[in-house]
Image (cartoon, rainbow, N blue to C red):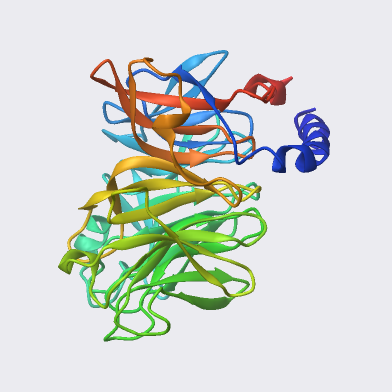
Amino acid sequence: MLYKNIRRIAAQLVCLLVAFSAVVSAQSYTITDLGSLSPTAINTWAQVVGNYNGHAFMWTKGHGLKDLGTLPGGTYSSAAAINDLGVVVGTADGQGTVVAKSPYSDQPCSNLIQPFVWNKQMRGLGTYGPAADSSVPEAYWCSFPFYGAGINNRGQVVGYTGELPNEYQWGFLWTTGGMSLFGGSWPQTFVNETSNTGQIVGQNNPDFLVSGHATSWKNGVTTDLGTLGSGAEEYGSSANGVNERGFIVGWSTTSPLLPLLGSPVHAVLWTRNGGTRDLGTLPGDTSSAAKKINLFGQIIGSSGDTLYFQWQFSGPFEVIGRPFIWSERGGMQDMNTLIPANSGWVLDSAADINIWGQIVGSGTLNGVSHGFLLTPRILNIPKAQDISN
């Protein structure tokens, strides 16, 4: 029955395609308060995942917040993405296994930082070499983390490793057949998302001496997406999101310096024909970065003057400022101008957007940090519980 309902509503989506694409540029939104949740993702059915107080949570309109718990022996969990079947992926600590390279034996761990999938219950996916490298004693294998970043409707999970003993950092793909590694150019490979067509996007170093570049991996083919530097190797870029039409979004430096060294970055759209489009910034800002893109080409991200680095030299970072939505017809708009005036809300960041144009993110409500769900006023969105009938 689940798949029958998905096919039925998928047919409705096709019927709405033409009508919806004509109005996506001009929107106003209603706001749903998600409380203390820090949202990270939303699926087609408006199921939202995020994090609160060190645990992964799911929110639905009909049932509110649900704590997804932790792995056996674990202390925390963090949700990163959710697919249209309601399967969640993220990172957690707890019992797990490092799958060793032949001829070595797998290593059980009592406290392994690893990707998880949640489908009624949480399951750790373990990790895979080169943590299980012959040059590293088995006693240390359990200390190298892997982070879950994305999941598609096929159940394929993607993510990236922490820095491993050989100073390489890899992307990984997990399927029911197990986990495989790719990338690993020195010093870092980051993987951020995978589409339902199996296209994976992130950042890879094409050469020992150059900055990381936005990269796509599909069917065993690695594609360097380039930068805003017209081929200059000193420019850096990263891909954060991809849709089913093969359009990719992220950021690029605007000068031959890493962001850490002072270069502004701009949000970028990479098109299927190989084009690289600078989306600019909101008025008065110096930097922007695109986060996600939906099927209709609506893009969300942040615009501002401050860059926040999760790690020291490259990889995950955010532009701190104002959340934006971009469309071909509407250009880049500050989301704060599209919500009711005097609502008490200040929107700080946007995390994800679904096919209906619903957006989740974080902000403040009357000065207190809250998560939010924005819903376009013109649409009648199917409820999340429709898929479980």
Residue 222 vs residue 108: left or right?
Answer: right
Which residue, as the protein is rendered here, is positioned at the far front?
283
Q: How far from the left and from the top, in percent, is residue 271?
A: 59, 66
Which of 161/268 is in front?
Answer: 268
Q: State the image quarter where residue 26 is shown.
A: top right
Position of residue 291 in the picture relative to residue 283 (left or right): right
Task: Please state the horizontal and vertical placement of residue 274, each as a whole percent of the image.
Answer: 58, 75
Is 67 on the left-hand or right-hand side of 28?
Answer: left
Of residues 58 and 19, the one nearer the viewer is: 19
Can you say which quadrant of the picture contains the C terminus? Answer: top right
Q: Is residue 84 visible?
A: yes
Does residue 115 appear in the picture of this structure?
A: no
Residue at 41% x, 18% y is 341
Position of the N terminus, as image quadrant, is top right
Q: Is residue 239 left or right of residue 302?
A: right
Residue 345, percent from left and from top:
34, 21
Residue drawn at x 64%, y 46% as measured from the top left:
153
Determine whether 52 is above or below 241 in the image.
above
User: Where in the figure is residue 70, as x and y percent of width and height?
Assistant: 36, 32
- Relative to 70, does residue 62 appear above or below in the rendering? above
Q: Quadrant of residue 38?
A: top left
Q: Residue at x 26, y 86 (%)?
A: 209
